[in-house]
Image: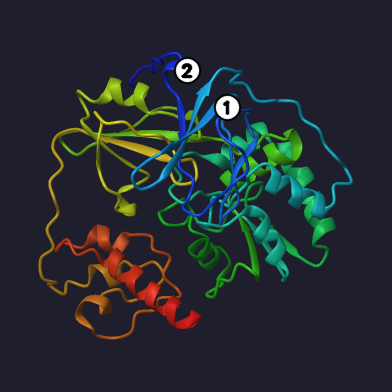
Amino acid sequence: MVHGKFSRKTVLEEPFTLFPESGALYLKEFPTRVFAGEPLVRQSVGTLLSPVDGIASLIQGEHSTKIRIVQDGSFQLSSETRIDSSLKLDQALQRMDELGLVSLDFSNTTLSSLFKTFCSTLIVLSPYTKTQSVDFQKILLEECRELHIRFLEYLKVWFPEASVKDYILFPVPFRKYEYPLGYPQYFVKKALSENVFQKEKILYLGPETLYHLYRALFKKIPYIERNITIYYVGKNGGLKKEESPIKLRDGQSLGFLLSEKKKEYPNFTFNSFFDGGEFHSSSEEYFLDIYKHHSIIFVSGKIQERNELPCIECGECTYNCPLECNPISLVNGQGKFFADACIECGICTYLCPSGISIRNKIREVKSRTQENRNA
């Protein structure tokens, strides 16, 4: 469904705004001139890069510090491909870190750390993102096939003992994508019958992660932009999708988009309804975070609060749990909840007719478990 092209104000009217994490190490003295891809802040997970050329300043807020960048340079990134037939693993890892690559399959994980901690013999190249909002397998096959084949050759050299399961060039052993097949743990279970998933034992790379990896390794393009899918939920509940995603930079203002949609779609949320994210007003100011956001869902009509009611023990949460974690036990206390297997896909919360936020209960259990392990 195409809702027309989006008009844009000049970039000078739309400063970019980044939100470094608390306690981050600032690598510049502000205000200062910055260039696209230049490191600005070192965080607990990788390095925050400037999304554009421009003048960067710090803005002290009540609860956080922001980096505001007024763009005054080129918006274009290099498209020249350079293939190094003898690229070593340590060189590739250095490039991943310099260009700000993170895993888009695991939260809060730098891409280089997956390679550094991998100590086994199974590498999985998956065709699915978590929500499959963009078909990155198709993009890889159309735009990056030769680069993908070259990367397979790199893997043979870097990890000579490893077996590579390549589901980009070769078909998956099931009929079609169904949520949550884009989650690493569930994909590996369905495709390879592996019931236990450890990142150290399985090097898992999804198609969006591979796409940005190839841009970095072969074109030296930093991770500063992402393909964002736009959805629309009408008053009758019908879901429509823009025909093509739009490519947006990190910290880019969504004002040009929200101003066009706010009359018909006064509210929006990020990513998917399974995520259970909060709704925002289309009349307010928001900026894209490419580390967290891959989709924007516009909603017409009013958003009604979902009140929690007592559990009716229908069992929908446990019956539909893709990894058989028994989430109903967190509500009625019967049986054991298998926290280590849970991927927090959100299906249990989404299906609960009583509106119980099982997701929050899961996160509380996992948090307590992690605290006990660290004690």
Tag 1 near tag 2, CB within 8 Å: yes
Q: Can residue 324 be seen in this view?
A: no
Relative to 137, does residue 337 appear above or below in the rendering? below
Of the numbered discs 1 and 2, the one sitting upstream in the chain is: 2
- Camera-side residue of 341 and 112: 112
The location of residue 302, given as percent across then percent down, is: 13, 38
In the rendered image, which quarter contains the N terminus? top left
Q: Is residue 266 visible?
A: yes
Relative to 308, does residue 248 appear above or below in the rendering? above
The single residue placed furthest to the right in the displayed view is 86
Tag 2, which secondary structure?
A: helix
Query: For the residue marked with disc 1, what is the amino acid?
Result: Val
87 relative position to 226: left or right: right
Work out how far the residue at label 1 is from the one at label 2, CA to CA, in angstroms. Answer: 10 Å
Residue 52 circle label? 1
The location of residue 354, given as percent across then percent down, is: 14, 64
Question: Which of the 4 quarters of the picture holds residue 150?
Answer: top right
- Camera-side residue of 358 and 324: 358
Query: Residue shown at 33%/59% (left/top)?
Result: 346
Q: Label 2 crowding class (10 Å Cα cut-off): few <14, some 14-19, many 20+?
A: some
Q: Label 1 crowding class (10 Å Cα cut-off): few <14, some 14-19, many 20+?
A: many
Query: Residue shown at 68%/55% (left/top)?
Result: 112
Residue 11 circle label? 2
Query: For the residue marked with disc 2, what is the amino acid?
Result: Val
Relative to 361, does residue 84 appear above or below in the rendering? above
The location of residue 357, given as percent across then percent down, is: 23, 63
- Camera-side residue of 291 and 150: 291
Question: Which of the 4 quarters of the picture holds residue 202?
Answer: bottom right
The location of residue 203, given as percent across then percent down, is: 65, 62
Question: Which of the 4 quarters of the picture holds residue 212?
Answer: top right
